[in-house]
Amino acid sequence: MKRKITYLVVILAGLQLIGGCKKYLEINPQERVLLDNYYTTPQDAFAALVSVYDRFGFQSGGLYDKVAIMDAASDDQVAGGGGPSDINDLQVVNTFTLNSQTGPQGYLWNKGYAGIFRANVFLSKIGGINMDATLKARYTGEAKALRAIFYFDLVRFFKNIPLLTSEVDPKQIYDVLQVPPADVYALIEKDLTEAIPSLPNTVVGATEGGRLTKGAAQAVLGKVYLQQAKYAQAAEQFAIVNGTTPGQANTTYGYKLLANFGDLFKVKNKFNSESILEIVHSNASNGGWGDAGASEGNLLNIIVGPRGYKPVLASAPDYYSGYSFLVFTKEFFDFIHFDPRNKATVANLDSLEKNGIATYEKGYQNSGYFLEKTIGRVADKAPTGQTELNFPQNAYEIRLADTYMLEAESILQSGGAVGAGSRAYQLLNAVRARVGLNPVAVTMDNIMKERRLELAGEGHRFPDLVRWGKAATVLAYKGFTANKNEIFPIPQAELNNTKILQNKEYGGTK
């Protein structure tokens, strides 16, 4: 698990829900911890909770994660890589040619339901453990909030999904049915609402960094409300997270925008004041190619690095040569070129080469513009293990600039005050002031522009376009089909011999 806490592996005897549930495991009691003998001590509870968190930070053995998928689907980036079939799951997302058998949806589905399975087992067992009541309540809250996060991604990405809140009897696994999305959202809201009171206001990054807090759960709940166009409720949750005075520290949670935008992406600056929820990575796990997906390193760091990178001058950036994925388009570079966030967002390899500073190989769909925010650095090489799989940069799931802009959007969409001096105005322009830009009016066009500039390459652009109803227009050049590609096809493996039905957008009946 990618957390800065002591790790203890929990092997649960049983079925890995839906995607993995169709393969039974042969359990040797002398070599495995059986479920019936587990969940007896507080230490068991903690280790089991760690196993739920593990799925939150899980990456594909194909060297990508949720952020990479969302970036490849956006208008700002292309899949890139070494050729048109390199990490094919990203290529078909980039061109919107994915289908039930081809694409990254198996990873998204299995990650979510494996996490839900573990959370459900945990929640069914923790009640029987004799332990401190406050600690038990916190662990329960974390498990519920994690389950809500898993379901939020699944319902956004697939729409028609099964809703499971308890362990599924193996005899019934093939009879699981989908439910209306509204039912899933109701469970998500319930889980988060019940979880928030028992979560801590803050955690110590050095020992508990990456664990859920009240603010993180409230930020997720705000996003859940916004996704359903419950704007007033979304604004209420974001306001708690963002604090009384935009631009100043939240006196309860300590959140505050960093003074320097570029500092957000420095590897050593983990769990900073702007971080609300991070996925934690490490360069000390000794991960190798045999377990790439289970590596503790950030796989995005290696896949976005420039291919065949070679410094020429001592002043050249210490990029680690990577695989040239998720390069920015020329259109995006022109869009951000004169914005103060350009240098911390875009690595201009063509400029480095033209000025004799460094050279690199031109990968597939090369534009010369790479994702500076997450390129692996030589200085961060792993002390042991496979370097490519063990870069330690954390990934933001939610940060404060994101929730500032989402609250401004929620206020605007709910008909609240947005004039000069209003809270929405202060929120939007605090993000701009941080990089030295003058205030602008609170309009949807300005919010959309600001989110594109501020959050580039962090996995937000594609979900934003879908939520705003702009995806069909903006992504038409990539092959996006309206009323289809807003969601993913359900993986074929989940349809075989089950009662799960394919989404009608992909030729199904659901």
Image (cartoon, grey):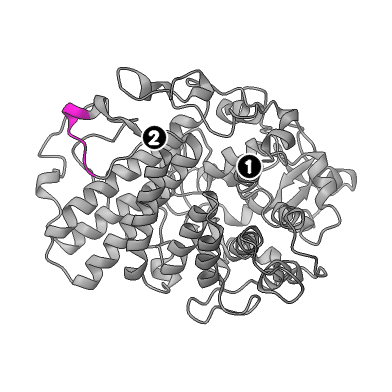
Q: Given the image, on which type of amino acid does mark 2 rest?
A: Ile
Q: Which secondary structure, mark 2?
A: strand
- Taking the image as drawn, is residue 68 in sight? yes
- Distance of mark 1 from mark 2, alpha carbons? 21 Å
Q: Residue at x 70, y 63 (%)?
A: 262
Tell me if 166 is positioned left or right of 436 in this view: left
Of 419 and 46, which appears nearest the observer?
Answer: 419
The residue tagged 1 is 462
Marks 1 and 2 close (CB-CB < 8 Å): no
Tell me if 258 is positioned left or right of 338 in this view: left
Residue 23 position within the rendered picture, expressed as x and y whole percent measured from the top left: 26, 25
**Is 169 rendered above or below residue 246?**
above
The residue tagged 2 is 161
For the C terminus, the image quarter is top left
Q: Which secondary structure, mark 1?
A: helix
Residue 153 position within the rendered picture, expressed as x and y whole percent measured from the top left: 46, 44
Residue lying farthest to the bottom in this orientation: 251
Q: Given the image, on which type of amino acid does mark 1 rest?
A: Phe
Taking the magenta stretch, the answer to whether it contains residue 300 is: no
Residue 66 position within the rendered picture, expressed as x and y whole percent measured from the top left: 52, 42
Of 372 and 181, which appears nearest the observer?
Answer: 181
Binning the other alpha carbons within 10 Å of mark 1 as few (below 14), some (14 to 19) or many (20 upward) gives: many
Residue stretch in magenta: 166-172
- Taking the image as drawn, is residue 270 in sight? no
Residue 507 position within the rendered picture, expressed as x and y whole percent measured from the top left: 50, 18
Q: Residue at x 84, y 52 (%)?
A: 337
